[in-house]
């Protein structure tokens, strides 16, 4: 999978590229509008991560350009502007998703995975990880062909872990992913722990033991 | 003690105007008496002259004594009567059985080398009556004048001060947090009020500019902080994915992650606060608060291991016109607050009606001043993990929608009440 990251903050660009390279994306990074334009003209990408505020132009313009020339790369906007208007503008210009800074890389990854699946899987909504099989359309999970009965939150949690397989995902990232803004101003994320506990128990019952690991106090990892 | 201007003005008038009018009345009385006496003297002299002329022309062949008119006696003045000076006297009228007051004037006049004492009389009764009547009429006029002045003064003051009161009302109603513009008329037909309005307008403009700058600062700062926070977050995620993490390093990373997270939440909340202040939530819809409370209560129960026991009385289909996300933030923050500041095995009571929402929870009494509870970054001393912005958000949203929010602590219960309608 080829990924173009357009971000003017070198340190953040470097983080994103490192993260996605580690999970086997082919990454290219640019820091200016002009460079981004050149790259878009010359190459095809599966997905583009686009910052709105660039030193020599607006990400929206880039998006407009991209859509005018019928390039159908998936575009995820990353922006420091957490305003609804920006989000609507971005999506109207043809962006596929919108993430607000400061985001978790695992969240960005989950969004990109979902986007790529929507765009290129052509309706095949089955996600496999080891013995686990997730049917995203029917929202069912099987473990060694036995159906797991998961709550909505547990399903989302497992999907998030599978999208970020073999990576440590922090408690905060999980909390924000599953509960969104409802977790704002909450002093602890202990509830993530109880969800993980339940999920682990259900997986163990069907024979998928130890695939969800706890990494010290930091977070969790689905190891395949 | 301060009293309304109109009342003070009236009191002042009522206190001093009668004194002035009374003084004027007395002066008038004295002047009128002087004039009356002067007139009587003139009459006496004239009468004397007339009588004497008749006496001389008739060569003494007239009545020498006419009661209450004149007396003419021959001979020099041998009594103590002062000549040429009017005097007071009384004459008895038998038919009226009354002594009546008269002014008399005696002069010594010479005719045919004979000295005559000529005394003329003028009645004082009529003039006294006239003085009394004029005086009474004048007193009545003055009372009417007093009433008229007070009424006119009240009316004209009310009219004159109208621009002032309208300015006062507008200034009182002005709320800087609502981004209103204060429009005061520049022309009030009174120079002082024009100046006042100009001064107030200038002041408000300056305050507005300062307030706008401050809001802008918070919003800009929050925006700018987002990028470094994103960098820290991304680096932390790379770090926790490093192979061979030791427990020691993991615990350090855990602390940094927690702190970063708090910082990020604070920043997000500050940004949200400035957005509410800047009216960036214009989309209003009919929000079913009853369903929202039930749903949030359900969700939040899942987040906490020791969720307090809930006792709720929620009327169905309480509808408010508000922005959906803001209503959600408002209610979830109040409920979260009631959970966070509860006792172990505590309780929460929730009452919802179309007019108000009341959330009560058990908990230790506050260490800080309850007045400051809704201010930013105010929190009870022993709470270190919360951002101290939850209730500031509640307050901000309530201000936006004109809800009244209040806090009370009674018998171990914290109560937060929101009144939706006045």
Image (tube, coloured by chain):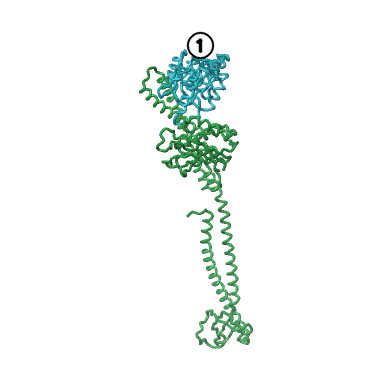
Q: Tell me the SS state at disc 1.
A: loop
Q: Quadrant of residue B101?
A: bottom right
Answer left or right for A158 relative to B250: right
Q: Residue at x 38, y 25 (%)?
A: B251
* Residue B265 to residue B157: above or below: above
Q: Find disc 1 in the rendering and name its residue.
A: A43
Task: Write down the colour of chain B.
Answer: green
* Residue B6 to residue B86: above or below: above
Q: Quadrant of residue B49?
A: bottom right
Q: Which chain is cyan?
A: A
The image shows residue B296 at horizontal and vertical percentages of 53, 32
Q: Chain of mark 1?
A: A
Answer left or right for B47 relative to A199: right
**Residue sticking out furthest to the left:** B248
Closer-to-camera residue (A39/B244): B244
The image shows residue B299 at horizontal and vertical percentages of 52, 30
Closer-to-camera residue (B82/B188): B188
The image shows residue A147 at horizontal and vertical percentages of 54, 18
Number of marks present in the image shown:
1
> What is the crowding at mark 1: few (fewer than 14 residues within 10 Å), some, or many (at least 20)?
few
Q: Residue at x 47, y 55 (%)?
A: B1
The image shows residue A22 at horizontal and vertical percentages of 44, 15
Closer-to-camera residue (B395/B170): B395
> Is residue A115 something one can see in this rendering?
no
* Residue A67 to residue B329: above or below: above
Closer-to-camera residue (A68/B308): B308
> Is residue A186 something one can see in this rendering?
yes
Q: Residue at x 43, y 27 (%)?
A: B261
């Amino acid at each position: 999978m080829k990924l173009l990251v357009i971000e003017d903050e070198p340190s953040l660009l470097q983080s994103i590229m490192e993260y996605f390279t580690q999970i086997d994306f082919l990454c290219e990074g640019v820091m200016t509008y002009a460079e981004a334009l050149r790259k878009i003209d010359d190459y095809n990408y599966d997905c583009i991560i686009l910052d709105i505020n660039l030193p020599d132009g607006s990400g929206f313009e880039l998006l407009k350009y991209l859509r005018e020339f019928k390039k159908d790369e998936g575009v995820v906007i990353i922006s420091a502007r957490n305003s609804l208007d920006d989000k609507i503008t971005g999506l109207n210009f043809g962006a596929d998703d919108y993430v607000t800074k400061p985001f978790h890389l695992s969240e960005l990854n989950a969004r990109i995975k979902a986007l790529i699946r929507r765009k290129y899987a052509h309706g095949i909504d089955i996600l496999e990880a080891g013995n686990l099989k997730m049917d995203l359309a029917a929202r069912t999970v099987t473990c060694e062909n036995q159906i797991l009965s998961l709550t909505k939150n547990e399903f989302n949690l497992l999907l998030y872990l599978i999208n970020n397989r073999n990576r440590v995902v922090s408690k905060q990232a999980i909390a924000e992913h599953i509960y969104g803004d409802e977790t704002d101003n909450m002093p602890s994320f202990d509830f993530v722990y109880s969800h993980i506990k339940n999920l682990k128990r259900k997986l163990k019952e069907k024979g998928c033991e130890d695939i969800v690991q706890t990494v010290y106090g930091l977070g969790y990892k689905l190891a395949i | 003690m301060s009293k309304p201007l109109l009342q003070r003005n009236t009191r002042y008038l009522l206190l001093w105007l009668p004194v002035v009018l009374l003084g004027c009345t007395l002066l008038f009385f004295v002047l009128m008496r002087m004039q009356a006496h002067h007139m009587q003297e003139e009459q006496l002299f004239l009468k004397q002259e007339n009588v004497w002329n008749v006496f001389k022309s008739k060569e003494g062949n007239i009545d020498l004594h006419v009661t209450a008119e004149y007396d003419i006696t021959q001979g020099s003045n041998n009594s103590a009567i002062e000549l040429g000076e009017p005097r007071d006297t009384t004459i008895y009228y038998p038919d009226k059985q009354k002594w009546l007051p008269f002014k008399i004037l005696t002069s010594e006049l010479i005719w045919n080398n004979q000295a005559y004492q000529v005394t003329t009389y003028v009645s004082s009764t009529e003039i006294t009556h006239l003085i009394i009547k004029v005086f009474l009429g004048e007193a009545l006029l003055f009372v009417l004048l007093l009433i008229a002045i007070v009424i006119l003064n009240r009316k004209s003051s009310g009219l004159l001060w109208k621009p002032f009161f309208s300015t006062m009302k507008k200034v009182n109603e002005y709320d800087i947090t609502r981004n209103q513009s204060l429009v005061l008329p520049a022309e009030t037909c009174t120079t002082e009020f024009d100046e006042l309005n100009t001064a107030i307008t200038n002041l408000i403009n300056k305050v507005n500019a300062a307030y706008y700058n401050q809001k802008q600062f918070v919003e800009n700062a929050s925006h700018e902080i987002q990028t470094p926070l994103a960098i820290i977050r991304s680096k932390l995620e790379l770090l926790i994915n490093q192979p061979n993490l030791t427990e020691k390093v993991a615990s350090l990373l855990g602390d940094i992650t927690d702190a970063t997270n708090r910082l990020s939440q604070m920043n997000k909340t500050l940004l949200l606060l400035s957005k509410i202040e800047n009216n960036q939530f214009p989309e209003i819809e009919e929000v079913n608060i009853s369903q929202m409370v039930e749903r949030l209560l359900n969700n939040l129960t899942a987040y906490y291991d020791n969720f307090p026991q809930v006792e709720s009385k929620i009327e169905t289909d309480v509808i408010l016109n508000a922005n959906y996300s803001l209503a959600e933030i408002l209610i979830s923050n109040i409920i979260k607050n009631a959970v966070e500041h509860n006792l172990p095995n505590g309780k929460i009571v929730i009452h919802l009606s179309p007019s108000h929402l009341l959330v009560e929870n058990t908990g230790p009494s506050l260490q800080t001043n309850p007045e400051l509870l809704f201010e930013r970054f105010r929190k009870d001393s022993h709470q270190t993990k919360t951002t101290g912005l939850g209730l500031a958000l509640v307050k901000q949203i309530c201000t936006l929608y004109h809800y009244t929010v209040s806090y009370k602590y009674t018998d171990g219960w914290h109560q937060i009440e929101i009144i939706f309608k006045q």
